[in-house]
Amino acid sequence: MPPTSNDFNEMLYRRLYLIRLFEETVIENFVKGVFYGTTHTCLGQEANAVGVLTGLAAQDIVFSNHRSHGHFLAYGGDPRSLFAELMGKASGVCGGRGGSQHLHWRNFYSNGVQGGVAPVGTGMALAEKFKNSGAAAVVFLGDGTLGEGVLYETLNMAALWQAPVLYVVENNRIAQTTPVELSLAGSIPARFAAFGIPVGELDTSDVTEILPEAQARLSAARNGEPQALILHTCRFGPHSKGDDTRPTEALAEMRCRRDPVTIQASRLEPSARLKIERETQAVIHAAFQAALEDPFPTDLDLSENLK
Amino acid sequence: MPPTSNDFNEMLYRRLYLIRLFEETVIENFVKGVFYGTTHTCLGQEANAVGVLTGLAAQDIVFSNHRSHGHFLAYGGDPRSLFAELMGKASGVCGGRGGSQHLHWRNFYSNGVQGGVAPVGTGMALAEKFKNSGAAAVVFLGDGTLGEGVLYETLNMAALWQAPVLYVVENNRIAQTTPVELSLAGSIPARFAAFGIPVGELDTSDVTEILPEAQARLSAARNGEPQALILHTCRFGPHSKGDDTRPTEALAEMRCRRDPVTIQASRLEPSARLKIERETQAVIHAAFQAALEDPFPTDLDLSENLK
Amino acid sequence: MTTVLESLNSGLQRAFSTDARVLLLGEDVLDPYGGAFKVTRGLSTAYPGRVIATPISEAGIVGLAAGIALRGLRPVVEIMFGDFLTLAADQLINHAAKFRWMYNDQARVPLVVRTPMGGRRGYGPTHSQTLEKHFLGTPGLEILAPCAVGDPGKLLSEAILTGEDPVLFIENKLSYLQSIHEPQSDTEFEITQIEAAQPAQGVPGARPTPVYLLRVHGAPPPVITLTCYGYMVDLARQAAQRLAFEQEVFVEIVAPTRLAPIETGAILTSARQTGRLIALEEGGVSFGWGAEVIARAAQALGPRLLAAERLGALDLPIPSSGPLEAQVLPDVERIMRISQKIV
Amino acid sequence: MTTVLESLNSGLQRAFSTDARVLLLGEDVLDPYGGAFKVTRGLSTAYPGRVIATPISEAGIVGLAAGIALRGLRPVVEIMFGDFLTLAADQLINHAAKFRWMYNDQARVPLVVRTPMGGRRGYGPTHSQTLEKHFLGTPGLEILAPCAVGDPGKLLSEAILTGEDPVLFIENKLSYLQSIHEPQSDTEFEITQIEAAQPAQGVPGARPTPVYLLRVHGAPPPVITLTCYGYMVDLARQAAQRLAFEQEVFVEIVAPTRLAPIETGAILTSARQTGRLIALEEGGVSFGWGAEVIARAAQALGPRLLAAERLGALDLPIPSSGPLEAQVLPDVERIMRISQKIV
Ligand SMILES: Cc1ncc(C[n+]2csc(CCOP(=O)(O)OP(=O)(O)O)c2C)c(N)n1
Ligand SMILES: Cc1ncc(C[n+]2csc(CCOP(=O)(O)OP(=O)(O)O)c2C)c(N)n1
Ligand SMILES: [Mg+2]
Ligand SMILES: [Mg+2]
């Protein structure tokens, strides 16, 4: 598909819209008690997931973090199995064991401990390099996660050993409730550059801008030059559920200016757009209902010496 | 003392020579079995200790690492109590409990776990700031220690909260046996600058060059702007004892070109120099002998519930 | 009725108002959010400049606070989830806890690190653990754990105000919302409060810490000693009541608030009488607190220990899915079953 | 006679030559240095590109290796001193050990982290510790510890070659130079090798690991069971000999090589016969391996456990000064004293 064709734009919109609807369904239904634990939706940040992961090769690896639904869906994950995982069902991505923050399917992984995913994802990239598989790894990080020291240990080794890895920082300028100004000294790009890692930076919610930049960096990474891509972005929703301390005007302004779904929608014929939305609504509705009806895991198969 | 006077130069020489003799005595006597454990001498790096710590105010804090003898002596520590500590004697800096890598006397501290001293020393600096005491802290790090992630967590917080702290990196281009090229990607100054910490850099073994630079940075730090100073330096001796894998020619060349003791000696009248050396030899000899004769710690006073 | 959360919050308030050297560092601790579990709520408003929102740097924060403590202030660190204590393990074990002794008692580290542990909220494998077992037995580190009996806030404020050695203060997420049972006025249990023996000089924990003894009001002498801490005290209470009323099995609950250095005086006194000892904990059962308790009892009582049991979580990660999580964590039913098994 | 060091070194060589997926990462592991304790000597020369000298980044290395393992290679990590495992605690506990189970058994992590523990060399408080107790009881993490009996190198090479779950492999600095006692040819002890029962499916450690039973040649039936691992096996041997010849007290030494998941079959079999059990370890005695052993014995044997004791290091940091260090660490004298006390 040529990157400017209608089909291409529609494909991107379909992915963005799927994530948007998934996340809205999660937020909407959380209060009803159908999900376990907590969750972190990526409302407003959908273009990062789609922009970065649309260009992925089949053998490539993704290591995501606590805010992983968009990444999972953009990777190609099944909405039903993700709903089911959040509901603690046997049909969930990890049979209900992991929940929202602990996913693994094909070459997609996530973990809920900030920063710790960086060395693991980088190790995977190094393994693929050792195996000559041609695969690269994408590791997603938040701005707040730049506080974790193990990240810098990792950047150093990634650069020393030329790991085929792309670090994507989704800088939504907030970590839970802490604004980036309170948690981050110096400069984000400089933190990667200091370890000899080339950095790109985009301040956009337009998936069509993110996609080529991510593509280019991913192929540079694949050639053994680890890369970083800083995506300045906007978190529309609460950190998890109802824990947003930001002023509502600022949020409204953000939604109006920086909505990746709206931006991409403007590129579509209204009828094409409507069709995609209707189809996606059906997909999400069916996925949610199916997950709801899926059974819970059966009893753990436990041996005596575990009891 | 004006910084160019003879007295001043002699004072500096006395300190350098004291450290040199101390370290040589340690290496010489280790094989005789008078010391416990292991040790890391700073042969060749004496000018860093003297250059940085001569300008310290009484209330200032030093947090040193495994290679701490020079720092301790330049801080004003007693050679006898340091010998005694290495010998495991009751009169040792820490009564024999700590040994070479774990010292504390007045505002001097050291610990043998790489990198971990950075947050602790920085916390001390912040405490002094909170108390408005006007004290600053100096934290010593090696090039290899730049591998530890907690250092970067610390730099971020030091910059955010304007800790009165000076980080001194003694870059001897080797960590145990690992050359800096194998352990360090990117650039050392950039690693500090990335967190908004101003960095100075010197490639010298001349104590009179280090001293004013360190002074200037320490006063900037004291004013609430954390600073870094990279001192490119030469380790003449083995990492600990007899574990040097570097070619002897390279070492010889280093000793010839970059000996801080020789460099400073050239500024002294031969007679003044001789006098200082004789006096210092006597000091070190007496300290060593006294420590040798000091008693071992008596039995631990242990309560029943520890037994 | 005061909840554990309110009590801890007022303990912090008290510490801040009593001593200007008290500071608090943690992630997202500022108002209006007031911390992920709201334990610090109101503090940053009342004491601006003394409550510091930190980057996400658990090791760095604990190290920084250890340095702050070494210089005579009294820092408190909040680790948002106890699961992340692993990131601060080196700073706790090889730095904060060691300084005093390795510096020949020439330095002290009055540092309190507080953190919530525990599951039953579906948070999944990295946000539901009970990990204090990995820190028990660290020389120089005192570990405290309040329960919904007595005065959790006082336990905390005294650790902050009068401690001179590092304290790891283990809270529990489910405990937060429990109402506190007052020893004098508990309607279900007769509660006796005694003080744990203080460890030897030179060992941390040299402050009075309460141990609570609970028996169902008016019950005959107990035949089993149930020892536990934190949220498990609540499950033990429920089990004890049901055992008494449904099975006529009478137990004594012994609930210490200091886990380490361990002091088993009250546990052994009770076990000497009952001859039957069960140690309960929410953490994985192997190599946990209960192992030390049972080992000490076996050593002290020899064959007078007729029966010993432990109950904890299965040795598995904590799953997110509710039905699975319920299978992994210890519950009232299992406490009852194990109790019935040994009478 | 082969030393433990030689055996471990050839275990590594064997693993490298058998399987091209084996890699090793660690600080200063390259020749000619070959690692701080020389366990990796020769490896980087024989297998260039598969032995990687790393920066000083313990957490990062373990995390990286976990990622490497997740993608089907078989990485081995050397942590230079066991004291620094604390830095990798999060990577071990919240990452490597969790992946398999939390990903619903859809991923495996064949990772071996090796490290030397132990004191008696005067290295002081941060280079002499025995810290494995802080990792025992981590779901998903197998912990092995060779001793100078049998085949330490085989224990290592099988962990590397056939393991599918993360293994923490605990060596001991003093053990390295000990000559290995062969069960068939030991002149002092009759040595029986049995296999520890394998844990349940889905639990790590599902490989045969030996347990060694040692009795002084020709001695009458033992009256005490002494259980221990690693370097303590050597001290137990010395104590057992002296107890036999000087006091006519006969003991059986039970030396497992797998510490976790714990398997106490052989220990309990022996303790059932002797009725007296002592658990020895070099780590601080509180909350260590011995606690779990004694607790399990108390639970399994009840009043048939006539006497139980533990001996470990005092609950203090390890001092550098020789005379102090000797007081803190367990020794032959103390093993004998505690044995005499319970017969
Ligand atoms: C080690 C660790 N510390 C703290 C947390 C709790 N936590 C979860 S998300 C989060 C904020 C992360 O902020 P950022 O990295 O900016 O990602 P965002 O949530 O903005 O996507 C925090 C503090 C955690 N999961 N792991
Ligand atoms: C956390 C940790 N890892 C490893 C070591 C072992 N070690 C001691 S010194 C050293 C090398 C340090 O190199 P560098 O920081 O350059 O200081 P230098 O020895 O050159 O002064 C190493 C690896 C340690 N002490 N702490
Ligand atoms: Mg963010
Ligand atoms: Mg160096």
Image (cartoon, coloured by chain):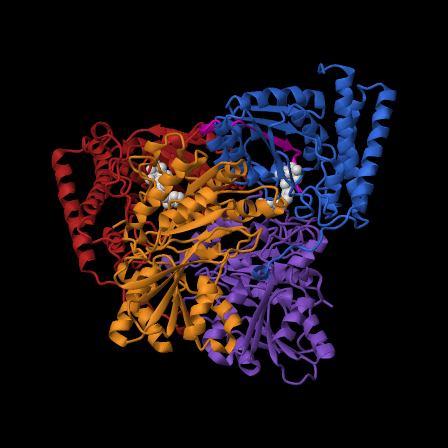
Chain colours: A blue, B red, C purple, D orange
Q: Is residue C11 magenta?
A: no
Q: Residue at x 71, y 61 (%)?
A: C177
| Magenta segment | A159-177
Considering depth in this image, is D305 or A236 the residue closer to the camera?
Answer: D305
Q: Residue at x 53, y 51 (%)?
A: D204
Horizontal side, residue C180 vs residue B232: left or right:
right
Q: Residue at x 20, y 32 (%)?
A: B262
Q: Is residue A161 magenta?
A: yes
Q: Is residue C55 above or below residue A15?
A: below
Considering depth in this image, is A215 or D259 the residue closer to the camera?
Answer: D259
Quadrant in the picture for the C terminus of chain C:
bottom right
Horizontal side, residue C104 vs residue C212: left or right:
left
User: In x, y percent, where is residue B198?
Assistant: 46, 32
Horizontal side, residue B174 vs residue C11: left or right:
left
User: In x, y percent, where is residue A90?
Assistant: 72, 47
Q: Is residue C175 above or below residue B116?
A: below
